Image: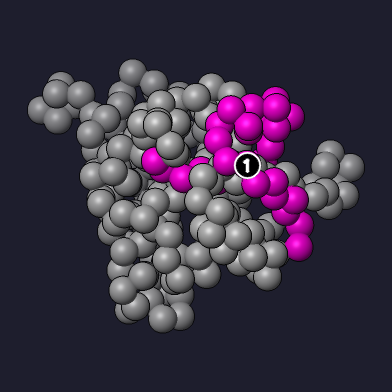
Amino acid sequence: MVASAKNPRGRTRTLTGVLIEDNPDHAQLILAQLERDQSSLRLVWVNSIAEAEPLLVDSPDIVIAEMFLSGRALGDTINQLRQQCSSAVLIILSGSGDEHLAADAIKRGADEYLIKNRDTLGQLAARLAQSLADRRNAPRRARAAPQDTADPLAHITGTLEHISHELAALLQTPGRATPGALKRVRAVLARITAALATTTPASRA
């Protein structure tokens, strides 16, 4: 179930989301899965970023996008989505388990890179809930962390600690030895690769 959010008065509110998917069959599978697994997300399906633009103006909580939308490169898709809804949880979906693509997606600003298969779709609601919780807790962690922005390793260390917790939680889920779970582990490890890639030559010395 996707975790619901609370407004300043403590009341639960419905989460809003946009699904950008140009394959109708895949879109229907994703919508059906989330409808079964959650009750607090109002998800609107569109075929392209152009169709999504009026919805992105309203600052949705979640954006789920196919990695290779027709005629668009991965970098263009993520850059435009991040410019238009910087605070949203951004989930990139792909039919490919390429860990280099996963690392690139995370490095460019995606919160998650998920492979479109039965196992992963079954975990989609849980991954959305985790990403929402991470987004809500990020300002708190930033306030608690030492304010030494000149040291890139401080940022990398915090990122790797967070990823290690995600990996531990993933390996403790039922059926963790399935091929789908192992692919998700590879995606998490790709995030570590992306984090390490942001270190400067001086910081590696």
Q: Residue 156 is drawn in which quadrant?
A: top left
Q: Residue 194 is drawn in which quadrant?
A: top left
Q: How many callouts does the rendering have?
A: 1
Q: Position of residue 179 (x, y in %)?
A: 31, 74
Say what secondary structure mark 1 lies in.
Answer: strand
Q: Which residue is mark 1?
A: 46
Does residue 131 show up?
A: yes
Name which residue lies at 31% across and 54% down. 96
Q: Residue furthest top?
A: 150
Q: Which residues are magenta?
A: 39-68
Magenta stretch encompasses residue 51:
yes
Position of 32 relative to 128 (above/below): below
Does residue 155 show up?
A: no
Magenta stretch encompasses residue 25:
no
Is 165 in front, or is 22? 22
Q: Position of residue 178 (x, y in %)?
A: 34, 78
Position of 161 relative to 152 (above/below): below
Is 166 in front, or is 2? 2
The quarter in which the C terminus is drawn is top left
Position of 93 relative to 159 (above/below): below
Name which residue lies at 30% across and 68% down. 182
Position of 21 relative to 32 (above/below): above
Q: Would residue 12 be found to the left or right of residue 84 on screen?
A: right
In the rendered structure, which amino acid carries the disc numbered 1? Answer: Val
Q: Position of residue 124 (x, y in %)?
A: 54, 61
Name which residue lies at 40% across and 31% down. 72
